[in-house]
Image: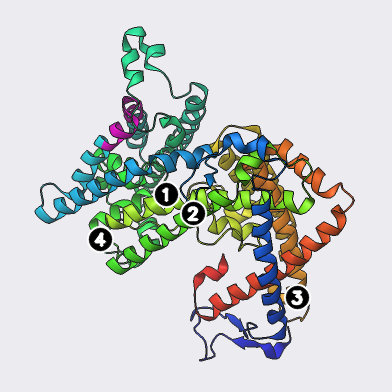
Amino acid sequence: MTPNEVINADNSKHKHNTNSSLLLKKSRWNTPEFYFYYVCFSIIVPYMFYVGYSVSKDTHPNYPSYSPLLSDGWIFGRQVDNSDAQYSQFRDNLPRLIPLVFIHLISSHANRHYHWLSPIKFTCIVSLIAVFLFHGASALKIILLLSINYGIGKYLGGHRLNPVLTWIFNLTVLFANEHYNGYRFQSILGHSFQWLDEWQGIQARWHILFNFATLRLISFNMDYYWACHQKQEKIEPPKSDKDRINTPCALSDYNYVNFISYVLYTPLLLCGPIITFNDFISQYHYPSRNINRKYIILYAIRLVFVMLVMELTLHYLYVVAISKSKAWDGDSPLEISMIGYFNLVIIWMKLLIPWRLFRLWSLADGIWVEENMVRCMSNNFSAQRFWKSWHRTFNRWMIRYIYIPLGGTKYLMYNSWLVFTFVALWHDIELKLLAWGWLISIFLLPEIIASSIFSEKKYGHKPYYRFVCGAGGVCNILMMMIANLIGFSVGLDGVKEMLTKIFLTSGGLSFLMSVSVCLFIAVQVMFEIRESEKRRGDPKYKM
């Protein structure tokens, strides 16, 4: 890029950040280069879907290998790939969940209108009822674990042992929950208590979802610990969402009722998004101004739309069943790569949909939580930025409670390794997830080193800079796809087999070159999307 293509942020033609020397670049959307990219997109993207659909046809030679995993569908007589256990559970329980959402919202708004109870006490009572409804008798185990954590935090307060024992307790609980499979009343108290094990509620495997509760438990204790070390001043209305997080509540707010209301808050109970204790309680004192009826309605429409897209995908692309059965014998490198790619797309959507539903529920109840998935997973070229937009609230939680307390960028590589090890263990105690976490830490290295040496500040004005960055973006995408397929799809052996069949074939090298060219074009478009965001002052350009 030549210097005359760079426009200072102070230029009145563009919106800008008034506190920074932001440089804005001229739009490339109407250039011959991008017209060429549009032609490529119009051909390649539909062809990708065609390939995914072709390997999902009942006439395909591998169809008998994975067809037992398919179920009866509802779209034009096609079967549906409901073989992903995580999304299948959500999808099958949705008809029971939606009435609960409406009952909760109607009762919550009625309480606010008629003032039966204070909003926080009402939330506490409803949350306790909901946890018994969702988890049956296991709610007693949950309340016991919560109470022990509360005792640690309140008894130790500002003592330096508070963070140490809080982390030791919650990490121990993560491992113990997994090892003892959620504990059994019969095993602990004897055969006469077997009836409690039979009262399982809607979600019997409470210990899997308790991982989200551990994040809230740590948040409460750490926020209280920091509050004990800060001079208590008059609590004033927060000026920003960041103030809600960083400004401690009054010490009297760190009580058991608020604690239970926060940790077991019904809309966010099962899987988030994640909110800090300070932020949660602040919104009961000073409701968020981000929420309005128009925003909630539009958000609900977007949710319904993405759910329909997911249904169409599961009815026409059986890639999850194919990957579970490893039914890719005889498939071309292109077909195998599309099986892998669409698996990742489905992973993104299967997380996006529940998170958006529960966020919508929370917004309708008056509690603002951040969006977890800020970008489509196909719109990422940077490993570092990817984690800012994928499970965003978890990323921000880790920065506040792990990364910064351990020294932040001062010990960047050590902290990155520690953070991703925790993320892997938090998801599940499996070798493939540890491999995923460590691979991510390794894959971050080239980008960190390259961006520090070949920085935009130093070389951004060079005409070749974005093309060199584009090549780096291609490498990042390939590495992220491999890591995420290992961690959340086919595992180490599956990825090894896929890569062998893709690249150790006669056309493997030429296929890799073709893929790299396509990804390079996609990365250039991603760059321009972020430049457009920068020009209109959208902070999302940093992600």
Neighbor class of circle 2 (other Cα within 10 Å; few <14, some 14-19, many 20+) is: some
Amino acid tagged 2: Arg
**Residue at image coords 38%, 39%:** 93
Mark positioned earlier in the residue sequence (1 or 4)? 1
Label at residue 465: 3
Residue 286's disc is 4
Measuring from the top left, give residue 107's x and y in whole percent: 18, 48
> Residue 209 sits in which quadrant?
top left
Task: State yes or no: discs 1 and 2 in contact (Cβ < 8 Å).
Answer: yes
Residue under label 1: 274
- Residue that carries the numbered disc 2 in the rendered image: 396
Mark 3 vs mark 4: which is more N-terminal? 4
Residue 382 versus residue 84: which sits nearer the camera? Answer: 84
Does residue 38 appear in this view?
A: yes
Q: Secondary structure at mark 1?
A: loop
Q: Amino acid at mark 4?
A: Tyr
- Circle 3: residue type: Tyr
